[in-house]
Each structure stands twice: as structure tokens, then as C-alpha cells.
Amino acid sequence: MILAGVSNIFGQRIRGFRVVDLLALTILLALAFGVYAFKTLAGRESADIADVQHQIVDEQKRVRLLKAEIAHLEDPSRIERLSTQYLGLKPVDAKREAAAEALPQIAGQAAAAAPAPAAAQPAAPQPAVVKP
């Protein structure tokens, strides 16, 4: 009985077309539209991925350029040349070099030899004010 009812529904015609044919055409059109929509979205995503990869390559080139610039700016011979040229600095004599263990003693000597700060020095006497 159920099979007869299903067979009857699929056997019916609407304007000369069977219901089953119309249903199949509707499903086919929906699938075609779905495939087209997903293909379009996938194309956009692949374009976005290519754009991001291009940005990554550009950033990597920029990082390499900046690293090369840092290496140039930190070059000891360049810094020595600039310090001599603009600041009048000279290399430290070997006699003036100190070991790390001697630094506390040198700091103590420098503190003892330094003049007292202005706040610790006695103030100069003020002239007396004569009241008439």
C-alpha cells in the first residue's frame, strides 16, 4: 500500500513533467549552484593565501635588509672611526685596562678622590645685614 502511494506520487505529472523529473532537476540545479559558489569561495581564498605569501616574502626581504643594516651600523671599525672623527676618542692604553676583580677597588679609589657634592659642602657665610 505504501509502495503504491509512492509510485502514484512519482507517476503524477505537472504540466507534462513527472514529479520525479522536476525533483531531480531541482536537486541538480541546487548542486550546480553549490559547486559554483564553493569554487568561487575557494578561488578567493587561494588569492588571499597568495597575497599573504607575497607579504611574507616581502617581510623576509625587509628583515634581511634590516639585519644587514644593523651589521653595518654595529661594525667595530666603523664605530672606532666615528668616535675618533667626531668625539676625538682614542683607544684605551693597555696600562689603563683592569680586570673584573679589580673594579670594586678602583670604584672605591674614584669615590675617595672625587670632590664632595655641592650639598655636602658648607655654605659660604652670608654678609651681615645692617639695619638703620
Image: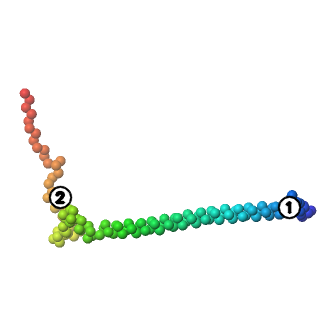
**Residue at image x 16%, y 49%?**
118
The residue nearer to you, when weighing 70 against 106, is 70
Determine which quarter of the picture holds residue 46.
Answer: bottom right
Question: Pointer 2: what residue?
Answer: 111
Looking at the image, can residue 52 be seen? yes
Q: Is 55 positioned to the left or the right of 71 in the image?
A: right
- Graded by Cα atoms within 10 Å as few (under 14), some (14 to 19) or many (20 or more), the crowding at tag 1 reads few
Residue 74's spot in the image, x, y percent? 30, 67
37 w.r.t. 77: above or below: above
The residue nearer to you, when weighing 18 against 124, is 18
Mark 1, mark 2: which one is toward the viewer? 1
Nearest to N terminus: mark 1 or mark 2: 1
The kind of residue tagged 2 is Ala
**Residue at image x 17%, y 68%?**
96
**Residue at image x 42%, y 66%?**
62
**Furthest-front residue in view?**
16
Question: Pointer 1: what residue?
Answer: 17
- Graded by Cα atoms within 10 Å as few (under 14), some (14 to 19) or many (20 or more), the crowding at tag 2 reads few
Mark linked to residue 64: none
